[in-house]
Amino acid sequence: MTTTGAHQDATGTPPRTWLWWGRRRSAVLDIGLALVSAVECSAEAVRFTAQIGASTSFGAVFGLLIGSLLVLRRQWPLAVVLVSIAITPAEMGIGMTMVGLYTLAASEVPRRIIGILSGMSLTATLIISFVAVRHDVQSSQLDDPGVWYVPIMAGFIAVGLTVPPVLLGLYVGARRRLMESLRDRADSLEQELSLLADRAEERAEWARTEERTRIAREMHDVVAHRVSLMVVHAAALQAIALKDPQKAVRNAALVGDMGRQALTELREMLGVLRAGDGGQRRTGQVPLAAVAVAAAAAAAAAAEDGGPRIADVEDLVGQSRQTGMVVELAVQGEVRAYAPEVEQTAFRVVQEALTNVHKHAAGAKVLVRLAHRESEVAMQVENGAPDAAGSAADADLPSGGNGLVGMRERVLALGGVFVSGPTDAGGFRVSAVLPHRADV
């Protein structure tokens, strides 16, 4: 991840305060420039006071004070430039003028003010250079260089002393602002990456929870019905083993068949899970969201390639009849194929409803209805009041209380409607309606 200046300030040692300087080397640089400027201004002030007949000592002190003002260039660049313009007629502060203009151009002062002060400095330097060059030409013993020599040389001097510092300062200021903008952008990107990482973790946790719920629901649907029928048959087998050996043999064969079917469905589901994370297990990294999506896709493919279908409801009813339960199946409408998810969910709803009858209403009469409509398929499983003397009363089947919750989740996930509740006759009714195409 990109490490920015703000990050370093937040995690490293806080910088030491040097008045208005942010760093020690900046203070050292400005103090050094101020010393050089003070010496230059002092020498030029001594020369100027000697020319006008004033006290050279006063000129030396005045030059030192004026030149040392350059130490304030970062804090008050406007004042430094104004002072340098004011002392231009005395031919003082050439270095102070150049450094002041550079600092002013690189600062956050509006461009209009920079242009005005730069123009004033250029004009003042041009006038003083014109006077100085003409005086040198008049005092020299050379031939007359021409009319344009003095203004051209004065212009070159004025532009050379004014324009390069201003242009360099504008460039450095623009580059500094660009770097600050890039640093701010890097900080914002770092914050966004942190937010995205947090959201990705939340999505991964959500996918982990959804995957656990889906696996638990699949395990419940696959195991509960088969095992419930096996327990009922085992109880009946125990009751008739000595009275009717031939019937006991048939019940034992049914228990074996149901056990094999349960194992087959469990293998299919475990194969789906292995398909979801088999490629990542070797590297030790398993993206949970990818596992959930792959598992859901594999489950749909399993349903399409031979998983439970609505047509298998008749076999499901037959298995319940073999336990002694009275089950009636009524089918309305023209039977047709649906989306794999719809087929599997419809089968699981009927399967879980029959399992609940085995657990909670042993010996009750059951009515299973299937209705194939134009754009949907409806199913209803209704049982009468439980018979306390039923054959499954002694089976003592446990209940986890998640059957209705799992059915509701399956139906609502496909955009369907699920209703369940007791009937007036003392029984229980489970109803579900699924659209023709899954609307996940």
Image (cartoon, rainbow, N blue to C red):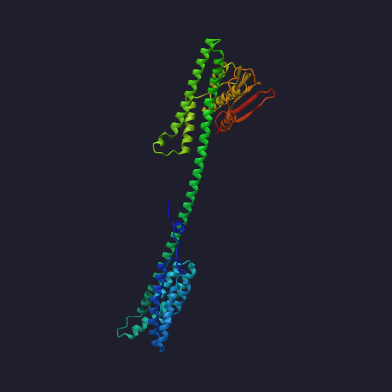
Residue 68 higher or lower than 440, as above or below:
below
Residue 167 visible in the snapshot = no
Q: Residue at x 49, y 23 (%)?
A: 262
10 displayed left or right of 47: right
Measured as percent of width and height from the top left, residue 241 is found at 54, 12
Q: Quadrant of residue 58?
A: bottom left
The C terminus lies in quadrant:
top right
Residue at the bottom extreme, as displayed: 53
Residue at the right extreme, as displayed: 424
173 displayed left or right of 351: left
Measured as percent of width and height from the top left, residue 16 is found at 45, 65
> Observer-nearest residue: 309 or 281?
281
> Observer-nearest residue: 13 or 280?
13
Q: Residue at x 49, y 29 (%)?
A: 300
Residue 261 higher or lower than 278, as above or below:
above
Measured as percent of width and height from the top left, residue 192 is found at 49, 50
Residue 261 visible in the snapshot = yes
424 displayed left or right of 282: right
Residue 33 higher or lower than 233, as above or below:
below
| Count of marks overlaid on the render | 0
Measured as percent of width and height from the top left, residue 194 is found at 48, 49
Residue at the left extreme, as displayed: 142
